[in-house]
Amino acid sequence: MAIIVDKIQKRKDIALSCKELFFQNGINDLTVSQVAKTAGVGKGTIYGYFKNKEEIVFEIVNILMQENIENKHIRLEALTTTREKIKEFASIFYRDEDVELRQLYKEFISISLTNPDREMMEFQTNCTNRYFQWFEEIIEKGIENGELIEGSQKFARGLFATAEGLFISSEVTHTIYDVKKEIHQFADALFDLIEVKK
């Protein structure tokens, strides 16, 4: 009897088996031969599941993002105010548990700036849009609940970009030493303006 292979799971297993290899070498120095050796499969098997090494990295990012989304949903459900939820949402830029996702993000930013690749940029755009839409929905829910003033959702993109920018600045210039503190201070200042006064 033939063995039935769960192709979706096999694809994930291959990607996850080389996650550490990716973190050690980065995408530019990662080779399909290394991936095959690390995964314990032939090179041909790798190409049966992935077109190229970038697609392997996309799979790793998807897996880590899904884990992050599931964990963030749980943490957000435990919070009551929109201010708390936005701070928790932005924790991706400083939480110890999200260090791998940040490392991948830095790799993508670096490649996008130095060697733009249409497929990679589209992937990154889709990832960013997914997180931004979720971020915006949190603010819109705050308006619906009477917690935030009408029009507060207009600040969503700026707040999201500021949190992202503070993280990037802390990594590139080393002028921001406490990203969490900076994000929280900015969020508090903004929410002092947009929260409904009771």
Image (tube, helix red, strand yellow):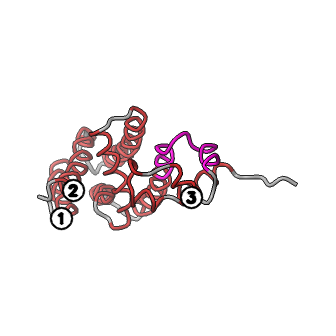
- Please say whether residue 189 is one of the residues in the magenta stretch: no
Disc 3 element: helix
- What amino acid type should be assigned to the residue bearing mark 2? Glu
Determine crowd level at label 1: few under 14, some 14-19, many 20+ residues with C-alpha closer than 10 A.
few
Of labels 2 and 1, earlier in sequence is 2
Q: Is residue 100 left or right of residue 52?
A: left
Q: Which residues are magenta?
A: 43-60
The answer to whether one can see residue 47 in this image is: yes
Cα separation between marks 2 and 1: 11 Å
Disc 1 element: loop
Q: Is residue 62 left or right of residue 196?
A: right
- Which quadrant of the view contains residue 179? bottom left
Of labels 3 and 1, earlier in sequence is 3
Q: Of residues 142 and 5, which is closer to you in this image?
A: 5
Q: Which residue is mark 3?
A: 37
Determine crowd level at label 2: few under 14, some 14-19, many 20+ residues with C-alpha closer than 10 A.
some
Disc 2 element: helix
Q: Of residues 132 and 62, which is closer to you in this image?
A: 62
Cα separation between marks 3 and 1: 40 Å
Q: Is residue 124 above or below residue 73?
A: above
Q: Position of residue 89 (x, y in %)?
A: 33, 56
- What amino acid type should be assigned to the residue bearing mark 3? Lys
> Which of pointers 3 and 1 indicates the residue nearer the eye?
3
- Quarter that holds the C terminus: bottom left
- What amino acid type should be assigned to the residue bearing mark 1? Asp
Q: Which residue is mark 1?
A: 178
Of labels 3 and 2, earlier in sequence is 3
Q: Position of residue 14 (x, y in %)?
A: 58, 55
Q: Is residue 161 left or right of residue 103?
A: left
Q: Which residue is mark 2?
A: 171
Q: Position of residue 6 (x, y in %)?
A: 70, 52
